[in-house]
Image (cartoon, rainbow, N blue to C red):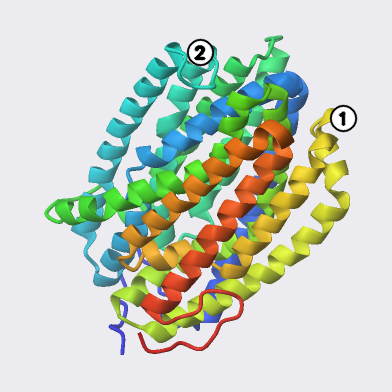
Amino acid sequence: MGRPMVKRAWMPDASAEPLLDFLLRGSFASFMTRVVGVALSYVSAVLLSRLLGVSGYGVYSIALGWALVLVLPSRAGLDYAALRFGSVYLEEGSTARLRGFFRFSACVVFGVSAVAGAFLFLVTKLGLTSMRPSMAPGVGLFIFPIAALGLVGALLRTARKIAAGQFYDQIMRPAGLIAGLAAAALAGINLSPANAMVLTAAGAFIALLFAVVHVARATGALRGAADYSPWRSWLALSFPLLLTSAAQELLNQLDIIILGYLQTPQAAGLYSAAWRLASLIVFGLSALSISSGPLVAAAHARKDIAELARVARITARFGFVASAMLAVPLLVFGRSLLELFGPEFGAGYPALAILVAGGMINAFTGVLAYFLTLTGRQAQALWIFIGALAISCLLNLLLIPGFSIVGAAVASTGATLFWNVVMWVVVRRSLGIDSSALALAPRSR
């Protein structure tokens, strides 16, 4: 039997709710938040593509890809650690340790972000990246607020503030960018990729300010005494999670980065639009994962394998059905949807179709990475992602010169297939559960 949850004044009592009910409620809140957020994100992307053109949007996308690669190591793995430690501290009522974790993590994220921004600026000036030097200042400003938003969002999720955990990053940040683009247009500013990157960073800073105020009110993380004594445990978990999350994000951005080296900015722009649309495939699964992450961490702490299996089954099956419902219209109307970015973007449809297939693979296997990183198996997840990175890099280098964005899409889907299959096997053998939509019965480890 698991240990009963300790209710605190600032902690919502969800212990009496059936697991399915809580997951669906939280996922519905997450889904609606993400629907609005995706709509705003696409409005901002369409505005940028039309204002900058295919080539300018490609330059912006390459810079954004480099920024997002550095955002994950800048979080130092502490956003994933927040899901694990935050969930446990909330159940135990260890508010002092929760405050210590938040303050410690904020300082680490700020320091690593500053180093990452300075490093990127230097290597870009030396001509060692595919990014234009004029983009480096905006990218450097962008890294810290995005990294910090991930940490704050994770803490809000552990406090069962599911919608709020995404609101600031998913809704307020793109809304701030849209407002910035509108203000620039009204002021008669000639938008360049560099200016667009600075506006993107400004929107992120505004969202972070409001998010910090919310997490302080929800958890009391900024007021009262803090206990920093478990800092070694925080770092011991966060370091492998840092490498894992960096490898995972590099998998997402590697295709665009290599396209920037081997092809033209126009090709990077076409692929970026196709990738952005294909990312909708795991929309439902992502919404479910927002609620399931803290549940996985808490169930593992109680050694409740049956609950882990239920979380896996609900998440994977609902997520796969949602992905299938999104895949059909993307395949049927994908070319028209791409042309919303501009008439030239319809040429990205073949890449979109291949990326949709990769998304369906990802949706079928469920939230595999959570079942490794939140149950103490982060080292195994890291090695699997490193293997996927090697496969992706090799396939990109082999296929992009001859097949351009179609080759990049094949490389991405091949790497996705690899890490999902290997992680499914590892989770099945180590935890005894089936995290996929098949939801095979748990077995003894």
In the image, taking residue 159 as reference, residue 345 lies left or right, namely: right
| Image coordinates for residue 331, horizontal then vertical, percent | 82, 54
Q: Which of marks 1 and 2 is nearer the N terminus?
A: 2
The one of 424 and 217 positioned closer to us in this rendering: 424
Where the N terminus falls, by quadrant? bottom left
Q: Which mark is residue 133?
A: 2
The reply to whether residue 180 is in sight is no
| Image coordinates for residue 16, horizontal then vertical, percent | 43, 83
The amino acid beneath tag 2 is Pro
| Image coordinates for residue 383, horizontal then vertical, percent | 38, 55
Where the C terminus falls, by quadrant? bottom left
Q: Which mark is residue 343?
A: 1
| Quadrant in the rendering for residue 65 | top right
Question: Residue visible at 56% across and 74% down?
Answer: 436
Q: What element carries label 1?
A: helix
The amino acid beneath tag 1 is Pro
Extreme left residue here?
229
- State whether residue 181 is above or below residue 298: above
Question: Residue visible at 49% across and 21% down?
Answer: 129
In the image, taking residue 236 as reference, residue 281 lies left or right, namely: right
Q: Do callouts 1 and 2 mark residues in contact (Cβ within 8 Å)?
A: no
Q: How far apart are marks 1 and 2 (CA)?
A: 29 Å
Question: Residue visible at 44% across and 42% down?
Answer: 149
Dot 1, how many residues are within 10 Å of its Cα: few (below 14), some (14-19), or many (20+)? few
| Image coordinates for residue 235, horizontal then vertical, percent | 22, 50
